[in-house]
Image: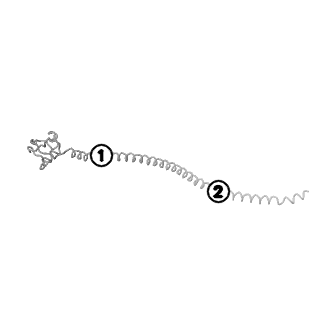
């Protein structure tokens, strides 16, 4: 049996060397591929970090955009409310202005209806003093301004002269 076992064992060290060499080659190839894979992983980690950063910025921008949209909407509502209030006040003022514009016309019509005859100069006269003007004279004498003008047709009421004589209407 000794001879049989010696003959079969002669190839065993050569096979072991071949298997060892193949293992070393595979190990070297694996190490090269592993370093390549590690480099690619490092590049991907950088890209993922940038992607995470961009995702965070997009989230922040999105929430800021939503806040701005809400603020603009609230500002639009408050501006519309203010315009509605101003519009109502303007309509109210327009009505008051219209009433004020029509009041003198109605008063003139009432004064014309009250008068039955045109104003006639009376026996009295008035001499203009410093600081006098037409309505002041009419009020002081107890006559209407329009009657005073009617009995003094040639008078320039914007330039009354001191000492000028004015006719007074009959009361």
Q: Position of residue 169 (x, y in %)?
A: 13, 43
The local crowd at label 1, few if under 14, some if 14 to 19, many if 20 or more residues have their Cα within 10 Å, is few
Which of the image's four quarters has the C terminus?
top left
Position of residue 126 relative to residue 50, above or below, is above
Judged left or right of residue 138, residue 63 is right
**Observer-nearest residue: 57 or 71?**
71
The local crowd at label 2, few if under 14, some if 14 to 19, many if 20 or more residues have their Cα within 10 Å, is few
Judged left or right of residue 143, residue 90 is right
Q: Which residue is found at the position 55% from the left and 51% from the top?
A: 55
Q: Where is residue 167 in the image (x, y as percent from the top left)?
A: 10, 44
Which of the image's four quarters has the N terminus?
bottom right
Q: Which residue lies furthest to the right in this view?
A: 1
- The colour scheme applied to this rendered structure is one colour
Q: Which residue is found at the position 27% from the left and 47% from the top?
A: 102
Q: Where is residue 141 in the image (x, y as percent from the top left)?
A: 14, 39
The residue tagged 1 is 99
| Residues at marks 2 and 1, CA–CA distance in whole angstroms | 91 Å
Classify mark 2: helix, strand or loop: helix
**Observer-nearest residue: 117 or 89?**
117
**Observer-nearest residue: 132 or 108?**
108
Q: Earlier in the sequence, mark 2 or mark 1?
A: 2
Task: Check residue 149 in the rendering and tell me which mark sits there, or answer none.
Answer: none
The residue tagged 2 is 37
Q: Which residue is found at the position 86% from the left and 59% from the top?
A: 8
**Observer-nearest residue: 64 or 75?**
75
Judged left or right of residue 118, residue 106 is right
Q: Do the residues labelled 2 and 1 touch (CB within 8 Å)?
A: no
Classify mark 1: helix, strand or loop: helix
């Amino acid at each position: 049996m000794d001879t049989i076992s010696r003959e079969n064992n002669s190839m065993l060290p050569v096979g072991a060397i071949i298997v060892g060499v193949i293992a070393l080659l595979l190990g070297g190839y694996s190490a090269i591929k592993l370093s390549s894979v590690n480099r690619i992983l490092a590049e991907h980690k950088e890209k993922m970090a940038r992607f995470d950063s961009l995702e965070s910025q997009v989230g922040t921008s999105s929430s800021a955009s939503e806040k701005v949209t809400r603020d603009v909407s609230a500002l639009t509502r408050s501006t519309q409310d203010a315009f509605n209030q101003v519009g109502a006040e303007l309509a109210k003022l327009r009505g008051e202005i219209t009433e004020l514009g029509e009041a003198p016309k109605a008063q003139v019509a009432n004064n014309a209806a009250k008068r039955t005859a045109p104003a006639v100069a009376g026996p009295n006269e008035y001499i203009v003093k410093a600081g006098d003007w037409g309505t002041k004279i009419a009020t002081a004498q107890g006559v209407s301004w329009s009657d005073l003008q009617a009995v003094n047709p040639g008078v320039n009421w914007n330039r009354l002269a001191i000492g000028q004589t004015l006719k007074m209407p009959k009361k």
